[in-house]
Amino acid sequence: MTDENDDIIAVEAGDEIGQFADTYSSFNKIINGLQRQYLALKDTYTEQSEQLRSVNESMQSIMSENRAVTEFLDSILNSLSSGVVAVNRIGNVTHINPAAGNILGLANDYRQYYGLPCDEIIKAVEKVEYSAGISVQSGRTFENIEKKIETLDGRILTLSVSTSLLKDDSGEIAGAVELFYDISKMKKMEEQLSRMKTLASLGEMAASIAHEIRNPLVGISGFASLLARDITDDDPRQKMARRIVEGVNSINRTIQTLLEFARHQKVHKTPLDLASYLQIVLDNFCDECGFDRSDKRINRIQTGQINVSVDLDRQLFRQALFNLFKNGLEAGGENSQVTIKCYEIPLNQAHRDYESKLELSGSETLAKIEIEDNGPGIPPQDLGKIFSPFYSTKENGTGLGLAIAWKIIKAHGGDISAKSVVGKGTRFTIILPARSGK
């Protein structure tokens, strides 16, 4: 006979087993569900990973293409002979290409200028309103505008400038680009060509009218000489007759100078030691003017360490120097003092400072001659006119002395310039192609 307690224990045990079975079944269902979710997530992860890999490859391809495009654009900018300066929306520099750096005289590390206002890099001395900074502010662009700038190393250049705007995806102005190239040499050539045309016209005019003027002058001079001969010395008319003769002689000298200036002269160059040649010319000048060679009005040539050879027409260049010496002595009056110096300009400096003025070969250096006086100086507004024919500040000057000197120096492949301080004097500087004798 079974005990009742045993039945109760058996029933309770059966219930626990059933609950356990139900719990185990539910757990299995949860596990199976988690496994299915895991498999689904794994498939999704695999799919997403594949998509991500594809997107990554596309991005790398795009980045590679962008990098190639950037390098290509940088290569184009770096190879341009024109200067390019880019600015952002507030006008600060963001990019400078090598040509711009060379033209503007910047240091090799252009990044030190990034972030600076554009006008601090391109310092305009004329037409300051034409720049990338103005374009980005106004929204207006400019094309082929000529403006003068002062470079960071102190040179004055004439640039041809154009600007364009940079816009973002929404069409808003994001910056601007200033494109420019140096036309200083071209402007210099235009000025010289204009001067040469003027000289050619002057020569034709001088040749056509010289004889027509001289013929009546001969008659006037002859009759005035006869009058002076026939009139006694105490007759007041004697003074008038002499003045007529002097006036005729003065006109004749002016005509002769004009013909010399207008005449096309062939240049016969020979190699000369510059320092020795200058000393000989200065001695000749003193002799012809009646100066003692120790006269303090003429400071002897200071040469320093110079040993250069120049190709000159000995007689023709002598005329140019005589005109400059005479001009300096006349400018200083009774207390005049003229100093003559000459130097050799090193090859690198010659090409850096004067390549825009002269056509130099790779092996040529330059010789510099300075002729300085202690005269009253030349006002700035007149300084640019002194080499023009017939311009003179002297009461009886013909205005041809400096013009003739300019013409002769140019015929030798050189250049002449003047600097003056009012009240202190004027310095004329001649530069000539030369060969070092060292």
Image: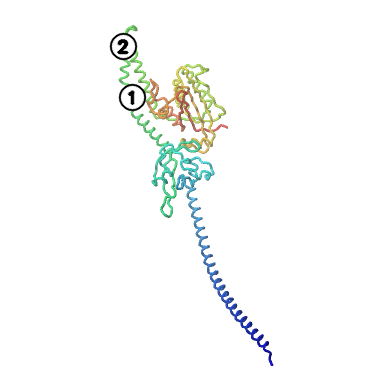
User: What's under tag 2, amino acid-wise?
Assistant: Leu
Q: How is the image coloured?
A: rainbow
Q: Dots 2 and 1: beta carbons under 8 Å?
A: no
The residue closer to the viewer here, 150 or 256, is 150
Q: How many marks?
A: 2
Residue 192: percent from left, percent from top: 41, 34
Residue 406: percent from left, percent from top: 43, 29
Quadrant the N terminus occupies: bottom right
* SS at mark 2 in the image: helix
Q: Is residue 122 above or below residue 437?
A: below
Q: Is residue 16 found left or right of 231 in the rendered image?
A: right
Which residue does the numbered mark 1 point to in the structure image?
210
Most extreme residue toward the bottom is 1
Residue 393: percent from left, percent from top: 40, 23
- Residue 405 location, quadrant: top left
Q: Is residue 28 above or below residue 248?
A: below
The residue closer to the viewer here, 301 or 378, is 378
Q: Please give the name of the residue rendered at 31% of the width and 17% of the height, measured from the top-left corner.
A: 220
Q: Please give the name of the residue rendered at 44% of the width and 31% of the height, measured from the top-left corner.
A: 410
Q: Is residue 154 above or below residue 339?
A: below
Which residue does the numbered mark 2 point to in the structure image?
227
- Residue 162 location, quadrant: top left
The residue closer to the viewer here, 216 or 121, is 121
Q: CA distance from mark 2 to mark 1?
A: 26 Å
